[in-house]
Amino acid sequence: MPDAHAEMQHALREGPSDSGGLTKGKVDLLSYYSLGFQRKMPTGREYVYLAGPIAGCSYDEAMSWRDEIQEDFLPGIVGVSPMRLKEWCARTPQIADIDQYRTITSQEEFLLTGESHAIKARDYHDVSRCDMIVAYLPKSSTERRPSWGTAIEMGWASDMCKPIVLVTDDESLAAHPLVRESVGWRRISARSRRMAAPATP
């Protein structure tokens, strides 16, 4: 696999100034090398994308359930988190939006993991390469700020015919016709650590 760090540095040096150092095409290329998620994944493993709220959450809120669920995965199952390499989110009490990202990141951090093209390219790549996704949507978070990114990722996964597990305590969300028909399993409990309940017809 090409040296991803070298690719990043090259793009930062060579990208035109009006893009802040990275063109959209180079962002897509760097995201394809996955910034921590191998392009050529080892065989014999199953990969699960961990979709859920980020904007509007604290760093701990965004990380804690992702860390917890991976502790329960059987050997050979690997969680893929959109929060990887985003430790800079811990510099603010609440993860907000792109404008805020610019104020708390270095130029390299922003261009590689905080800029909108980079976020979309990497998250789409991750969903496409994973075997299934878990979407965690607790009511307390979605009422504070809807997780539009998670909804889009669920749409991507549905279009790619990926199995989707929805974990939520928001019964109105779980009952939405498009959600009901898109997810394979629903668990109506934000605190549950068991994800095996099949969706009822």
Image (cartoon, rainbow, N blue to C red):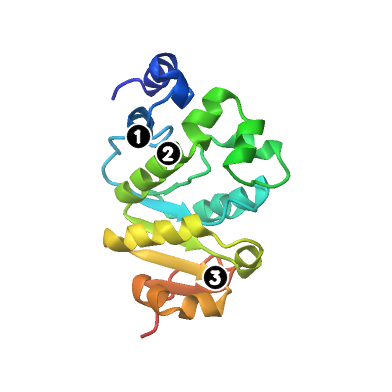
Residue 7 falls left or right of residue 95: left
- Mark 3 is surrounded, within 10 Å at the Cα level, by few (under 14), some (14 to 19) or many (20 or more) other residues, namely many
Q: Give the image quarter of residue 145.
A: bottom right
Name the amino acid, label 1: Asp
Label 3 belongs to which residue?
168
Q: Are marks 3 and 2 in contact (CB under 8 Å)?
A: no
Label 2 belongs to which residue?
117
Give x and y (percent) for residue 180: 40, 77
Give x and y (percent) for residue 135: 47, 61
Residue 111, above or below 121:
above
Give the SS element for disc 1.
Answer: helix
Residue 54 falls left or right of residue 162: right
Distance (Cα) linking label 3 and label 2: 29 Å
Q: Are marks 1 and 2 in contact (CB under 8 Å)?
A: yes
Label 1 belongs to which residue?
28
Mark before the other along the chain sequence, 3 or 2: 2
Near-viewer residue (14 or 198): 14
Distance (Cα) linking label 3 and label 1: 32 Å
Give the SS element for disc 2.
Answer: helix
- Mark 2 is surrounded, within 10 Å at the Cα level, by few (under 14), some (14 to 19) or many (20 or more) other residues, namely some
Give x and y (percent) for residue 13: 43, 14
